[in-house]
Image: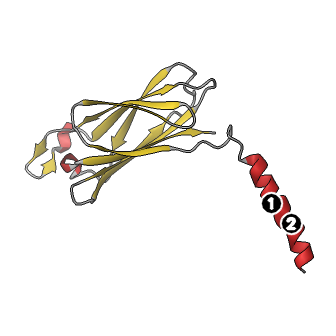
Amino acid sequence: MRRLLLPGILVAVLGAAIWATPDSWCAPLSKRYPFQGGLTMEIAAVGVSGLRLDTVRFRVPAPRGDRLLPTGGPLTAEVAVSNTADQSHMVGLAIALYDDEGNLLGVASGGNRIWPVRPDRQQTFILVFDGVNAEAHKATAFDISLEAKP
């Protein structure tokens, strides 16, 4: 029985090694930063794939007391991404907001759907914190993840 399993395991391991080449596997750039509403934050962090997270700007509607005003629209993040690689990349983004105690206050995700970001070009993405966002204006930190999609 052992002799039959060993060739199968070897084939699976070799197949995975061939499939996971540097061109097809790109680790996401994922970091935590202090939250600053209304200001453009210069990030300039480059990931393995050559995608660079240039800037992040949060648009926070005015709160009324302890809650956001519903007429002010949802909180949004404007994220500028540049492609410093030789090939075009589809982009995936995710942002999570946290308060001082580490409570999750809001999450947004997005990316491009049709056209990739070409080499030496920049694209801006608008991520909307809809759904759970009532206390998003209390954020003190955010995690952001940027990855190249296949």
Image-quadrant location for residue 23: top right
Residue where numbered disc 2 is placed: 8
Indicate the position of residue 34 as horizontal and vertical percent values.
26, 43
User: Mark 2 and mark 1: span between their CA atoms?
Assistant: 6 Å
Q: Secondary structure at mark 1?
A: helix
Of residues 53 and 134, the one nearer the viewer is 53
Residue where numbered disc 1 is placed: 12
Q: Amino acid at mark 2?
A: Gly
Image-quadrant location for residue 26: top right
Residue plotted at (80% across, 53% down): 15
Indicate the position of residue 60 as horizontal and vertical percent values.
21, 38
Residue plotted at (13% across, 44% down): 63
Q: Are marks 2 and 1 in contact (CB under 8 Å)?
A: yes
Q: Residues within 10 Å of mark 1 (few under 14, many from 20)?
A: few
Residue plotted at (63% across, 23% down): 86
Give the vertical position of 51 relative to 29 (above or below): above
Tell me the tag on residue 126.
none
Would residue 95 appear left or right of 8 to someone viewing this image? left
View extreme (left): residue: 65
> Split into 4 quadrants, where in the image is the C terminus?
top right
Q: Amino acid at mark 1?
A: Ala
Give the vertical position of 148 relative to 3 (above or below): above
